[in-house]
Image: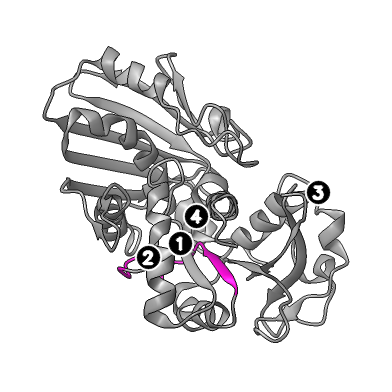
């Protein structure tokens, strides 16, 4: 893996696009070769087109790159990371896959397609076998691989080590940070001193995506898991970090200590991927943890924290929604794809 791969970012000036740029700067395997955005930004240097809002400084390697339109003829890259809205992603991502690019997408446009991997590397790496099926079916030289919804990612990582106990029912209540709605997603006067008990389309994603992620790939298709999931999703006045409360019914009725040990012993075997945290699940034994402000940056924002494991089984999950739940998830997917030799 000595040779670096040229990568581009679609929607590079937005909230998740900036996280992609941050994650890809000085990456040992990938080199940013193209930053693409709307016609309004095209032709400008990235430092002039992007209103950089992250805690880190804008990476020098990106600052002076000229932003190009979102066009397969103008984006010179082998991998493109998509931070596009779903309606635009449906056409654009397929165009790039047809043109021979690996598309690592954070968008929801293709997540439910039966031949498109919906990936969390620690959960279902074998689902990458769908890439060959997708290429044959669609006649593409490239492919599309997606990561799930930011809320789904956090708790599904913690469900994987619990599958041994026979998960039957799951109830989840999310308290989601405002950055998940993008810079202009929710007016300040709607969220300050307030909680909004509705996020359009979110509960449907949370209730459907885990069964695909935790399903079995039989060599030709994914047979979904059979977990009954009920979700209630809420927007809270926190900048970054989704916190989720889970109630999990399991066939074998494990004790809280057995669940805790399952989390502590979870080793997905991905330590050779540059973005993989070690450990991926951090158990917080303090009675008031995890908390977004204290724990969201664990593992460079890629670790998932759990705590308050109680009889029931009930526990709290927390992770960084725009890193682990978005850009970092797509980058980790691309690293696994590179490791497996698909590009």
| Alpha carbon separation for disc pair 4 and 3 | 21 Å
* Element type at mark 1: strand
Q: Which residues are magenta?
A: 101-114
Q: Is residue 108 visible from the viewing direction of this image? A: no
Residue at 45 percent across and 56 percent down: it is: 147
Q: Earlier in the sequence, mark 3 or mark 2?
A: 3
Q: Give coordinates of residue 286: x percent, y percent.
A: 44, 14
Q: Mark 1 or mark 3: which comes first in sequence?
A: 3
Q: Is residue 151 left or right of residue 336?
A: left
Name which of mark 4 and mark 3 comes first in the sequence. 3
Residue 180's place in the image compared with 86, above or below, is above
Q: Residue at x 35, y 49 (%)?
A: 234
Residue 121's disc is: none
How many angstroms separate mark 3 from mark 2 (CA)?
Answer: 32 Å
Q: Is residue 124 magenta?
A: no
Rendered image: mark on residue 180: 4
Tag of residue 57: 3
Place residue 284 in its image quadrant.
Answer: top left
Image coordinates of residue 140 in percent, x first then y, are 49, 80
Numbered tag placed on residue 146 in the rendering: 1
Taking 108 as reference, is 289 above or below it?
above
Q: Upstream in the sequence, badge 2 or badge 4?
A: 2
Q: Is residue 227 left or right of residue 93?
A: left
């Amino acid at each position: 893996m000595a040779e670096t791969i040229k990568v581009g970012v679609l929607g590079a000036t937005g909230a998740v696009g900036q996280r992609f740029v941050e994650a890809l700067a000085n990456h040992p395997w990938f080199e940013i070769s193209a930053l693409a955005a709307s016609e309004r930004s095209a032709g400008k240097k990235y430092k002039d087109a992007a209103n950089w809002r992250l805690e880190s400084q804008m990476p020098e390697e990106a600052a002076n790159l000229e932003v190009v339109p979102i066009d397969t003829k103008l984006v010179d890259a082998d991998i493109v990371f998509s931070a596009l809205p779903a309606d635009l992603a449906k056409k654009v991502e397929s165009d790039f896959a047809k043109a021979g690019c690996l598309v690592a997408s954070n968008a929801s446009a293709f997540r439910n397609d039966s031949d498109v991997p919906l990936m969390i590397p620690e959960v279902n790496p074998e689902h990458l076998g769908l890439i060959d099926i997708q290429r044959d079916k669609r006649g593409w030289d490239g492919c599309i691989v997606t990561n799930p919804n930011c809320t789904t990612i956090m708790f599904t990582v913690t469900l994987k080590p619990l599958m041994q106990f026979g998960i039957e029912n799951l109830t989840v209540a999310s308290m989601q940070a405002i950055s998940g709605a993008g810079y202009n997603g929710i007016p300040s006067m709607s969220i300050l001193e307030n909680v909004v008990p509705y996020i359009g389309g979110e509960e449907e994603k949370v209730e459907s995506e885990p069964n695909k992620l935790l399903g079995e790939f039989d060599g030709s298709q994914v047979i979904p898991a059979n977990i009954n999931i009920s979700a209630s999703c809420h927007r809270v006045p926190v900048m970054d970090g989704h916190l989720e409360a889970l109630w999990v019914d399991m066939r074998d009725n494990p004790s809280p200590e057995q669940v805790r040990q399952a989390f502590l012993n979870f080793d997905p075997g991905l330590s050779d991927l540059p973005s993989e945290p070690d450990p991926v699940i951090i158990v917080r034994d303090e009675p008031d943890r995890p908390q977004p402000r204290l724990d969201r940056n664990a593992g460079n924002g890629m670790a998932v924290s759990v705590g308050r494991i109680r009889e029931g089984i009930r526990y709290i999950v927390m992770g960084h929604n725009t890193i682990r739940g978005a850009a970092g998830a797509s980058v980790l997917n691309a690293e696994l794809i590179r490791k497996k030799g698909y590009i």
